[in-house]
Image: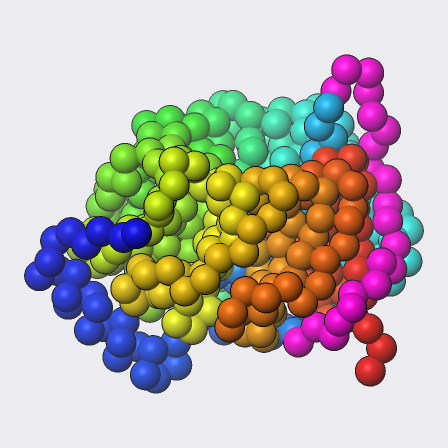
Amino acid sequence: MFRLSGIAASLLVFVALVQAQAQTPAATPAPAGGDWIHSRGDEAMQGRSPVELRFPLELAWQHSMMEKPKGQAEMLVSSAVVRAGKVYVGCKDGKFRCLDLTKGEKIWEAEGKGAFDGAASFAGELVVAGCQDGFVYAWNAETGKEAWKYETEAEIHAAANTWTDPATQAQKILIGSYDYKVYCLDAKTGKQDWAAETGYYINGGSAVGDGKVVFGGCDSVLHVHDVKTGKEERQIEVGAYIGNNVAISDGVIYVSHYGNHVGAYNMADGAKVWEYGEREFEYYAAPAIWEKAVFCGGRDKRFHAIDRTTGAKLWEYRCRDRIDSSAVICAGKVAVFGADDGYVYALDTKDGKEVWQYEVGAPVKTSPAVAGDYVIFGADDGKVYCFKSAKQ
């Protein structure tokens, strides 16, 4: 089930985790309930929300981002972000839209010359997203007017993340490109602060915690850099392609990868704390963290709950197809995610029992956005689906 390595270092990390969990387990504040300003809930990409959902969720609206072209099976819609009653989402045919949260009506639209795969992020009055045309775009979140754009040397699939310098309150955009680099851009101007070069493509978002930015990619390495200067702190070999963002909590990096495992690594020295995985199926979905557990869907068609300290299996739930959707843990009570079987699910975090499911009818690979009473998914039929909590 799991393997320990670096015994002495791991024991130190084990003690640190136990001490951290005896106090307040989550180091990064959870997002405000009515907004979803980071695609994974916070800049550490922990995949959690303080919102307590009421079931059954009901479909509030659906919005078609694109029509199916001939011969194209997948019509991918990105994960959404939400602020001030507006949903921001992109799609495969180059549209990026602002929608009304309660009705799903289009407020404004911008276009790129390639797909918008990765989720956007907010910085001040701007909403920022990367595009497969190689540009990072920043628009006024209210009007859709372009504020700036920054050109990388290859297409962008990764989600944007916003980091705020605690000393100056200056906001920075962190985003990876297929030119093998992760960029730190000034959020107001789009000018480059620094760029960190890796060994291959970057698909996932860049997580920030404890003054570090951590990202992985197709070079099978976790890269740890100083978030302010971009200086490399260390590289951690995981041995397989990392397709999504990592999560950071209490000085530990949690990562899922194509080597068929979910792993935990000490950020301070790179020591492996534990590794989980019992089947020959890779993980694409990113891990979510809540208190003493790590939650992650796999391409083994199962959703896994893992003990955060030891890496032991707590429980698993079987879906009808693989799970590439990164879950969000809501108020510590339910894990919400989608699957390639065309369903979206909510499971009880204590025992994995099904609380709710809904058939969308198309694969759901995106991470949900949880904003107040609303839960938003993008699906591979080119549509955005918005669900609402049951009435009190």
Q: Nearer the viewer, residue 191 or 173?
A: 173
User: Is 384 situated above or below 14?
Assistant: above
Q: Residue at x 55, y 31 (%)?
A: 156
Q: What's drawn in magenta, residue-wise? A: 52-72
Instruction: Give the overall secondary structure of the magenta segment.
Output: loop
| Image quadrant in which the C terminus is located | bottom right
> In this rendering, does residue 140 appear at all?
no
Q: Residue at x 78, y 41 (%)?
A: 361
Q: Residue at x 26, y 79 (%)?
A: 19
- Whether residue 60 is in magenta: the answer is yes
Q: Position of residue 331 (x, y in %)?
A: 58, 75
Q: Residue at x 36, y 65 (%)?
A: 307
Instruction: Answer left or right for 337 relative to 343.
Output: left
Q: Position of residue 269 (x, y in %)?
A: 18, 55
Q: Position of residue 288 (x, y in %)?
A: 48, 59
Q: Nearer the viewer, residue 343 or 289?
A: 343
Q: Residue furthest left?
A: 8
Q: Nearer the viewer, residue 207 or 323?
A: 323
Q: Position of residue 92 (x, y in %)?
A: 71, 30
- Whether residue 220 is in magenta: the answer is no
